[in-house]
Amino acid sequence: MKILSLAGMILIFLVLPIICGSVLTDLLHVYQGSNGRRFLLSLVSGNLLMWAAFEAVAVPLIFLRADFRMVILLWAIVLCAFVAVYALVRRRLPIAVVRGRDLKNAGILHDRIAVLLLVLFLAVVAVQCVVYFWGMHLDEDDSRFVAHSVYTWKTNQMLTENPATGELNLNNWNGDYLKDVFSPWMIYIALIARVIGIHPAITAHTILPVVLLVLSYIVWYLAGSELFENDKRKTFLFCFLIGILQLFFAGSTRTQSEFTLLRIWQGKAVVAGIGIPMILYGFLYLYRKQEDERFFWMLLVTDWTCCLLSGMGIILATAMIGMYSLWYVIAFRKWKMIWKVPLVLLPSIFYGSCIYLYKIGRLVL
Amino acid sequence: MRDAAIQVFDTVRESFAGNFFLIFWVLSLVYLFFADKEKRRILVYPSILAGVLIINPVLYRYVWSKVFDYAYWRAFWMLPILPVIATAIVTLMGKCRKGSLKILTVIGCVALCALTGTFIYKDRFVFRQNYYKIPTASVDVANALLALDREPRAVVDHSLFCYIRQYSPDIHLLYGRDAWGFIDVIGDRPYGVYQQMKEPQPDLHYVHDQMKDLGYEYLVLLPSQIPQYKPENAKGYKASFYMDSLKKAGFQYLENVDGYIICRAI
């Protein structure tokens, strides 16, 4: 069972994201000459693509009160179809890998200061992962999120119960329950728990935080590499500083770091820890490489992902992409890009409209 | 508009309480504006634009308060505070010529942020009691209830109700966190039971009657909530101390699990 769980983890946290992400980065022609960064971006964007695909599949099936196993099956088919169609059309499957030769060529191993800064950065991340793995932080919000996951994992029913009490709640998707229907991150946790064969509470509280935190720092690394034009020393120092500063960005319970370092397994915290940094990184990439506008599609995937993560994610992604696009269009005189912005925001607009229509009673299923 | 400005100011003050990161962010933006043309273009201007649009009483009144509702403070996540501060420190360090000065600059800036900030893990994490990362008492009580019934219907102490269903969805509760007014509104009768169970000495007759009416069988409570409880007996307690008073209220004592009394409504 332990070996199967480990195999499941390697599959869902490593193999699938790398395959899906490699296809995405290849489609967008990102970092063609930089295998290290391409590998890391593939890992992150592959996860985002898997999450976006889950959102696309799960929401209609939740409305149809379908079986959870149907969602898993369709989700797997969608991902396989995406990769298969790409492989058939291009007649190859691009898998991003990191080779020792790439590191040598990049000169990291010869630069002692860069190595030292990398070690410091990794040490900070490791400490935070250790705290997540061995520490326990109780959060009452889990009585909704994790309880939903456990229920789905056990019964194959999705969001048909009141998570607080367990009573059937088939026709009462009001308030925050409605947000859960359109942002079913907790059902995705149940999917992970099913794939790796581990109880959702353990998956959410012990395994997922470590994975998500590492993904979060990969995004910061990519953002740093854009900010400092891939200067390794400055990028590693930037990431180290982000890690250290996060540790002291507290006091109120509302800061981005509080959500990232204390409860990253919750959807809204994934928005804070991965979604928002990813949008920032996307725009840093676009601001720097203005001729490479294909990266806008990465923002579409990110926006779709934020819809899965949290109801607030729908609003935050819309507002942030809107604001930063405004700067992109005005400052770099990319007037032709105006049409792309609503296109990138299509998932947010669609799910946001559905929530609104459901609230006013115009969407009944 | 004055009210909106006050609300924006209050939210900013509450959200950045315990650290000076907002001030450091502004200082970093000012520094980067003059220090690095490229950063000004790709980081400073977009940050200023975001700041002006987010911390804005007019937009708060007409947009943010409507879309964010009670959680306007989450809009502050869109301000790139940490990356701007980190970039400013890296840029400042880059301007230093001597190696020792570079190290001192980084250490000084980090120390300033650390000393004026609040350590995030302070009183927030404890060593895990189990891999589920929920109180072990809730796991043990859940297991005890599941040993009694396949799908037990229970009323549990408020220290347990947030966690028990994270362990098993088979346990049905009369009320959970919704009794605190979160997410959903619970019925008058479950709320009445919750109000009683909050008391140091609840009216167990009332609790029993409501449980029987609503179809709930098991009650999990603290020994101190049982009327005949005496602190001097707590150390070497015997079940018989509780049995009589529980019986009078219509409950059958079943067991004591991790300091919680489990009984059945008869």
Image (cartoon, coloured by chain):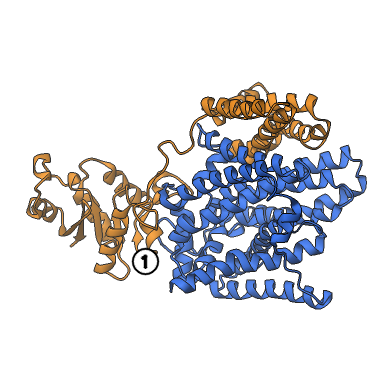
Chain colours: A blue, B orange
Q: Is B165 placed left or right of B233 in the picture?
A: right
Residue lying at 70% horizontally and 54% vertically, measured from the top left? A302
The chain holding disc 1 is: B
Estimate the x, y position of residue A77 in percent, counting from the top left.
66, 76
Q: Amino acid at mark 1?
A: Asp
Instruction: Say if A18 sits above or below A130 in the image.
Output: below
Can you say which quadrant of the picture contains the N terminus of chain A? bottom left
Q: What residue does disc 1 label? A: B170
Q: Is A204 placed left or right of B149 in the picture?
A: right
Nearer to the camera, B167 or A179: B167
Instruction: Say if A93 sits above or below B121 in the image.
Output: below
* Total marks placed: 1
Residue lying at 37% horizontally and 51% vertically, measured from the top left? B128
Nearer to the camera, B86 or B224: B86
Residue A365 can be seen, yes or no: no
Estimate the x, y position of residue A253 in percent, counting from the top left.
50, 36
Estimate the x, y position of residue A299 in percent, counting from the top left.
75, 53
User: Image quadrant of residue B113?
Assistant: top right
SS class, disc 1 = loop
User: Image quadrant of residue B147?
Assistant: bottom left
